[in-house]
Image (cartoon, grey):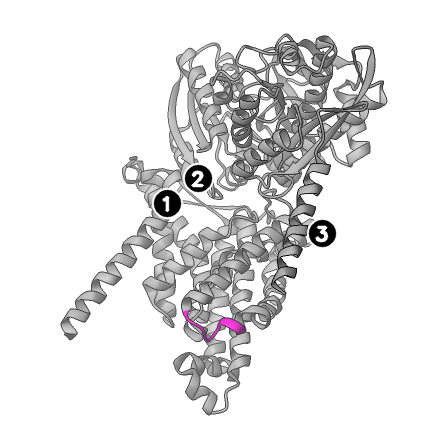
Amino acid sequence: MRLNKIILSFVSALIILFSTSVASFAKVVGDKIILGAAISLTGKYSSNGVHTQNGYNMAVDRINSMGGVKVGGKTYKFDIIYYDDESNPKRAAQLAERLISQDGVEFMLGPYSSGLTKAIAPVTEKYGVPMVEANGASRSLFTKGYKYLFAVLAPANLYLDVAIDLAVEKNNGKPVTVAMAFEQDAFSQDVRLGVLDAIERTGSKKVIDDKLPKELNDMAATLVKVKQMKPDVLVVSGHTKGALTAIRQIAEMKVDVPMLAMTHCDAAKLSKQHGKNSQYALCASQWHKTLTYKDNFFKDGMTYAADFEKEFGYDPPYQSAESSAALLVFKDAFERADSFDQKKVRDALAATNMQTFYGNIKFAPGGQNVDKPMVLFQVMCDDSGKCENKVVAPTKWASAKLIHPVPKWSER
Amino acid sequence: MDFMVFQYPMITVQACLDGILLGILFALIAYGMALQWGVMNIINIAQGDLVILGGYIAYFMYLYGIHPAWGVIVAPVIMYFLGVLIYKLVINKVVDRDLFISILATFGISILFMQLMNFAFGADVVLANSDYGTTMLFNNNVVLPNSKLFSAFISILFAICLVIYMKKSKLGRAIRATAQNARAAKILGVDTEKVYAATFGINAALCGVAGALISITFTIHPYMGLPYTIRSFMIVIVAGLGNLPGVAMSGMGLGVFEEFADYILGTEFRIGSVFLLLVLILVYRRFKLSRKREYLK
């Protein structure tokens, strides 16, 4: 009996061992370039995780169907191994380790969110695996001296400083008063630092500086203070829940503020959830489909949006667009490196200078993309209550004129 | 530290009113917890998750074009049956065990619910719009969203109905009898098994009402349940079991405390201050208890 048990456990151990080793891939198998990605398919980031995955898949299909990647005179196709990181940084780091040391992946795509990217970056750095990430904007990612991390998106501190500049411009160049409410996570705090820089640069004054908790669903106290202090600008950043809570309570409490600037309006589907109450809100965005950047694969933003909608059934948020752009960057780097040597690919990535439908991409030594400004769009509604996001800043890309100051609630 | 709340009297009024309205809603959730704690000796960690689930019911009605306020009728009905089901599947196996087992079991249910809700409804933060408008008081200096007034009104209404039901109906009397002495009630012919199931169902129904109200007033999210569990736990230990006026008062007190903590310490300490208060109260109660013991010696 006991012998049987021992044999049984020995055999099953062997089976487990074999199944893992059979499943392992090398970086390039046949005509396939295998990329690895840990993505939040479950857990609190799962919606944006899915947007990210859809963006990656869309680009993989497109690049493969349009001739693939040409390296050393041979054509290769992209393939991605995904793991679900359960929105958990620890798990993400384990999975990165597994992708690299067990699955043999030599090139990585980023996860969703700054927090998870922060967890993975030390691992990819340790193994010298180039990672192009599209969803980690926290400034701290780019100040650690990482050599193998490249982000196609603009860093978090640039999200809302445009709004302060815009408010000063509308105030005839005179300083403004600013009320701030930011969640206490790495990303939002970076956005806050950017706003503080802008306040200092323009000689403006902050009158409220509130921190929002993770379990935020009530910011009435902040808004009462805003009512009392009457600032020129109210800046809110607290992921989706921050955007939704702010709009609901501003409308309910009839808070009049000349300019309201936020992040995460796209993901919050602001105008869909709040209709006309969300009107005039300014939102920082990495990308908007009306921008006129171009490339050979997706043509431009409008075409990308149409194709994406056809495939996945919804309008692409910027999280998808930037994820697609990451693949374009990899393809470009592989072809310029003309090799699969990690070091050569890394150097090629560092020298990237290209335009994609998502924007210009050029990496600073820290790895962040310095060639693509953030855009601000404003929610604008017509009389029938249909709302649309229109780009209002920077002026070069504007498709509508900024409505400023925001009309008072009593006049709406 | 920010003492603006005391510098402007209108903000003080606003904070108090906001706190009281919020507290009434908390008290409703806490009442459900007190009820089942008293009857079955079970501390339900999944309380907050039942609340959120109720919120999702109202939200889905809203998505399909039904006014979310109807959620306060539909959600408790659905949640009642869900509560009974949870009782039959899990709770009846732990009801006679010690408190620790029931905490573990409901903790498990809580995690399960969180993940299931996340799986079924997605990780997005959602809300249901009631379009109830706003009431302005004191020359527009104090604003009260009508949705908050509505929540408080409905909470009070449900609490009153429940009190009357407990006093007058047969099941209500049976529940109270079981709470007093389960064994004696059993001997006298009360089907305690049925009473337990009904109690758990009623608690879930109350959570459903509260959840529907929260989706109208605030936002809901699969992982947002725990703060509601903690708050109701705290209200119950302050008020004691079977003490409805106490639950209502300590609910409102907690609401006002939270609002003031928010103004003075900042929003980031809002939930934190609740946890801190919980610790202080537990320490205080223990201290009082130990003095009593000494006296007995």
Disc 3: which chain?
A: B
A170 w.r.t. B151: above or below:
above
**Residue B94: within the magenta?**
yes
Does residue A178 appear left or right of residue A32 in this picture? left
> Do labels 3 and 1 touch, CB within 8 Å?
no
Q: Are marks 2 and 1 on the same chain?
A: no
A132 w.r.t. A269: above or below:
above
Tell me the residue that label 2 is attached to. A213
Numbered circles on residues, count? 3
Instruction: Pinpoint residue A384: horizontal percent, then vertical percent.
Output: 72, 36
> Do labels 2 and 1 touch, CB within 8 Å?
yes
- Is label 3 or label 2 in front? 2
For the residue pair B68 and A236, the one nearer the viewer reads as A236
Residue B112 appears in the figure = yes
Q: CA distance from mark 3 to mark 1?
A: 37 Å
**Residue B262: within the magenta?**
no
Q: CA distance from mark 3 to mark 2?
A: 31 Å
Q: Are marks 3 and 2 on the same chain?
A: no
Does residue B139 appear left or right of residue A334 in this picture? left
Instruction: Pinpoint residue B260: horizontal percent, then vertical percent.
Output: 33, 45
Amino acid beneath label 1: Gly
For the residue pair B269 and B191, the one nearer the viewer reads as B191
Tell me which residue sits at (44%, 81%) in the image: B178
| SS label for mark 2 | loop
How dense is the environment of label 2, judged by Cα within 10 Å: few (below 14), some, or many (20 and up)? many
Tell me which residue sits at (53%, 85%) in the image: B191
| SS label for mark 3 | loop
- Is label 3 or label 1 in front? 1
Tell me the residue that label 3 is attached to. B64
Q: Are marks 3 and 1 on the same chain?
A: yes
- Which numbered tag is attached to residue B272? 1
Q: Which residues are magenta?
A: B92-98
